[in-house]
Amino acid sequence: RQAAFRTDLSVLLDQVGTGKESLSFMKRRIRRLAQQWATAANRLDAKLEQQWRDQKKILVHVGFLTEESGDVFSPKVLKGGPLGEMVQWADILTALHVLGHNLKISMSVKELQGFLGVPPGRGSCPLTGPLPFDLIYTDYHGLQQIKQHMGLSLKKHKCHIRVIDTFGTEPAYNHEEYATLHGYRTNWGYWNLNARQYMTMFPHTPDNSFMGFVSEELNETEKRSIQQNKVNNMAVVYGKEASMWKLQQGKESFLQILHKYMEVHGTVYYETQRPPEVPAFVKNHGLLPQHELQQLLRKAKLFIGFGFPYEGPAPLEAIANGCIFLQPKFNPPHSSLNHEFFRGKPTSREVFSQHPYAEQYIGRPHVMTVDYNNSVEFDSAIKEIMRTKVEPYLPYEYTCEGMLERVHAYIQHQDFCAPEPPFIPANLSRKGSAGGSRMMGPLFVPLPNTTALGWASNVTAPSAWPPLSSLRLLVSQEGQSCVDACQSAGFICEPAHFRFINNKEALRRLDVQCEVVDSEINHILPAFSVVRQECGLQREPLLFSCAGHSPKYRRLCPCRDFRHGQVALCRDCL
Ligand code: UDP
């Protein structure tokens, strides 16, 4: 069946259910953004020009909100606890509904069993028939529950699963045996999924897919009125829980400097009296409902982070409401190796500031990232912020239309169940086999100290997505990951393209001198050692990884182009 866009959200609101603060929060959000979603649906509908869209049967099982997982989030909704996850799930549900899919929502193990057709009280019971869904969106908690109730049949059906995973899962952690043997074993990873089945909050881990969420958009009138009503010396602090303010203690100076120039506002949760962590000069509003926070941000000139929480939605909302976001640089970077918060998360990603997306994808004048221990630098940043005029800004990928476009593309094109489509390297292709399929033209990307060559002019893969036309082959520096190699050339690493460059032909085209070519199981392959003239190809497709790096190796990197403001999609991806 063809999916038809929906602009009425009442059915969805009924499906979400009642009885918990988390559900009320999500429903308030869905209602508040309803008009914006409807407009976006109409625009995308027109943009896709009658393109056929399959209607999918989709189950959304929100594991972290189930009683069985302890549901630690719901009781904290009104107390300054994390809301980012709730924001994202509300938006995922809305996007799937608006795109016109056949949606079932489960927030308890009982509902999950009902939808999967597992008889009640049977515990772990392999699903015998076919899976009644095309797609299941869940999280790590939910995945565990699904495993318990599907038993061994999970293996057969897992290609249908998508895991919402805020901070990302790198391939080395995802591959059970490899993780166990090489020290990448955590409490979360090792599910042996295709790493693109994990979907993140920000596009920070190109090995995974980028799901995201949305932020409020302003029309031209609102933008103008915001700019007229900005209070140049008004700052709002990012941090709704008192503990986040502890970060400024001991180095009290930066908040004192800020207070020298600006009126400081906070939205810190409190029960009866001001939390001791919040200095007396701060005007604390208490935790605000989302729409009241937006109003506060519309007046404020500065939204300032103290280093925690990492990578949340609030800075995007602030920037969309015309604030400048000021945040600390982390030197050394934070990661699972050196910071409690990331410890045990299935990633080695290094976080160089509180909000790397804001730093890398938005940047000045909307975002300033400075060393908070350097009071001169901090002081001059505040003065610059008070002088600078900025317009409200929201990257396209965080608008409703951008999210609908991206989720639409994933649903229609990502298929982890089908066997890999045929791929014929040039030296193996038979005469005439390229007929009718998409071919990539020769390309040369000049890069300092990095080899980049046109390649793949004879490679064919008619049904690949992203299409092969987006592939750019690069070689990293020694010690550099493909994430960084592609990024420094203005591209993005595309794990789906590894299989096209994991062969002798690619090495030959790059003029790599190989004494030997081995095929091994190692997440930095394909790669080569210049000194030893050793080349290695990847033997385990699950370990194709944009993230890996090693000081002795230069990696072969499959990069691709991307759309401005929609990094998840290549130029020809729609
Ligand atoms: N938020 C809110 N009231 C407040 C402060 C924040 O409703 O007083 C909302 C905000 O609009 C954002 C959400 O909390 O959408 C999550 O914000 P944050 O970036 O702090 O991420 P978290 O750590 O909660 O995941």
Image: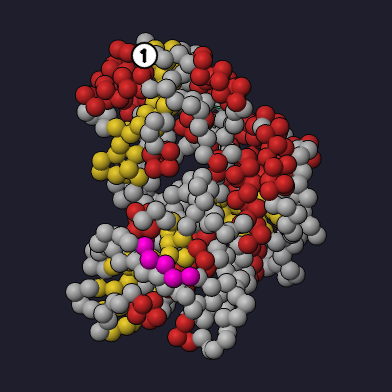
Find residue 108 and report its horizontal and vertical position in percent.
Answer: 67, 47
**What secondary structure is found at the residue carrying circle 1?**
loop
Q: Is residue 12 above or below residue 567?
A: above
Find residue 188 and report its horizontal and vertical position in percent.
Answer: 47, 55
Q: Which quadrant does the N terminus fall into?
A: bottom right
Is 549 on the left or on the right of 568, as rendered?
A: left
Q: Main secondary structure of the magenta part?
A: loop
**Please, which residue is most extreme toward the left here?**
531
Q: Residue at x 32, y 22 (%)?
A: 384
Using the image as rendered, state which of residue 525 and residue 386 is in the foreground: 386
Q: Which quadrant does the C terminus fall into?
A: bottom right
Q: Tell me how many marks there are.
A: 1
Report if residue 538 lies within the magenta region: no
Would residue 565 be visible to someone looking at this image? yes
Q: Residue at x 47, y 57 (%)?
A: 561
Find residue 274 and report its horizontal and vertical position in percent.
Answer: 43, 14
Q: Residue at x 36, y 18 (%)?
A: 386
Is 461 on the left or on the right of 118, as rendered?
A: left
What residue range appears in magenta? 441-445
Q: Is residue 192 above or below residue 19?
A: below
Query: Which amino acid type is marked by label 1?
Result: Met
